[in-house]
Image (cartoon, rainbow, N blue to C red):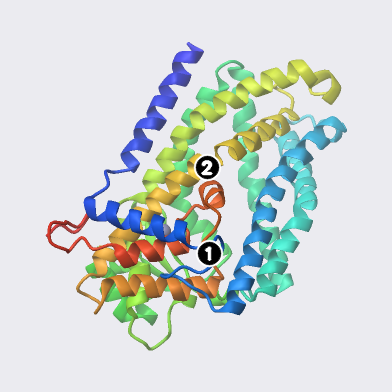
Amino acid sequence: MRLRSFALALCLLACIGLSACASETPAEHAADLYAAKEMAAAPVQGNLPDYSLPPTQLTQAQHLASLRLNLHFGSEAWGILQLVFLLALGIIARMRDTAVRITRHRWLQGYIFLLLFLFCRTLLNLPLSLYSHHLGLYYGLSIQSWPGWFADAGKALVLEWLVGGLLLLLLFALIRKAPRRWWLVFWLAAVPIVLAGLYLSPILIDPLFDHFEPLALHHPDLATQLEHMGVPANRQFLMKASAKVTTPNAYVTGLANSKRIVVWDTSLTPGQSPSPEVLWMVGHECGHYVLHHVLKGTLLTLAGLLPLLYLCYLFLEWAIIRYGTRWRIPSQRDWGALAIILLAVSLLNTVTEPISNAISRQIEHHADIYGEEAIHGLVPDTQLAVKNACDSDGLRALEDPNPRPWVEFWTYNHPATGRRAAFGKAYNPWAPGMEPKYFKK
Ligand SMILES: [Zn+2]
């Protein structure tokens, strides 16, 4: 029965994954090949013919890329090691003891345990988080003051405690009621919870951290263009990102009637009509919006969550038999089991990171194609608009032109900027014998 459920979950995941990777058109294939050849022929971390940085910025981008890579794997390894240390040193068991000593009420115990646990992990992660923000300030990518940064981190911690507490109580109630099936029941409960979270986050959570206004209020020209590309005016927002960062960006979020496009004000110049480069950037987001990428990505994540929870259950059973006495966590009903489950999640996330990033890059690639086709006819030179957008956005964000192939494969959730620029430059579905992928002739 266990194996059958697991196999079913994997099949579901594979089916959704395959449907996300829609078939490649001839024009797309040709441009993909062109981009791959251009990157293979250029020096690693060096400039490409279709995306290049001036010498000073190239050195900065290379330095920043290697620092970020160390930070990425350092954070992952530290996240796993700290959980092992906390368990092995008996600190998790002491947190459990404290929560149980303070109150006999199980709900309160759960919240107290989680507060101690989150506080401890935040302190342990603080050096790397501080260094990461320092890097952003040093390279001029962020302008957020330290008090503002600490305020945001504090808000995130409180949110994690309040929402995480509810999930923790639900998880442990299910572990007590269905000790052998909790992974399946919790997954069934997680589906509506995650979808509700997706619906509510742009309404309740995002405004806690940033300021949003209707896009049409400040950029009516762009709002009209977006309407033509398929996004209603009441679903377009401008985010005051300039209070914190200098880099341009836009994104799609929400579900059903909370679904929306958000453009950062750092991407736009007040009082000016949108440039071809900006049009491609928002066209890419229209792709996410029209092709329902947020919902598809969420369903894919939920499909992946089922085998992940099952493996967490197996890991928890094994860890308690093997180390339960030493760690003073005698059963999966113990609050301390949370640390073991999170250890399993961290290990699995680290191992499966290339899979989730490959799916994400594929989705982003489709949005790039949609954006390029959407602006065709609206700008003087479609391919040049894409190339120039990658050039200017990549320069402002100090994007490494040609990352090592394994780095892009393992850690990039978007195709490398150089690949996007080269693809955009070469993509021509309007040539004789070719056909656009989304905007058929
Ligand atoms: Zn995107």
Position in image of residue 268 (x %, y %): 43, 79
Quickly name the residue at label 2. Answer: 354
Position in image of residue 269 (x %, y %): 43, 84
Distance from Cα at disc 2 to Cα at disc 1: 32 Å
Count neighbours of disc 2 (C-alpha within 10 A) and say few if under 14, some if 14 to 19, many if 20 or more.
Answer: some
In front of the other: label 2 or label 1? 2
Task: Look at the numbered disc 1 and give the secondary structure of its residue.
Answer: helix
- In the picture, measured across the screen, residue 300 lies left or right of residue 233, that is right
Between 109 and 121, which is closer to the camera in this rendering? 121
Q: Is residue 99 visible?
A: no
Q: Is residue 393 visible?
A: yes
Q: Quadrant of the C terminus?
A: bottom left
What's under tag 2, amino acid-wise? Pro
Task: Look at the numbered disc 2 and give the secondary structure of its residue.
Answer: helix
77 to 395, vertically: above or below:
above
Position in image of residue 262 (x %, y %): 42, 66
Task: Identify the mark nearer the N-term, 2 or 1.
Answer: 1
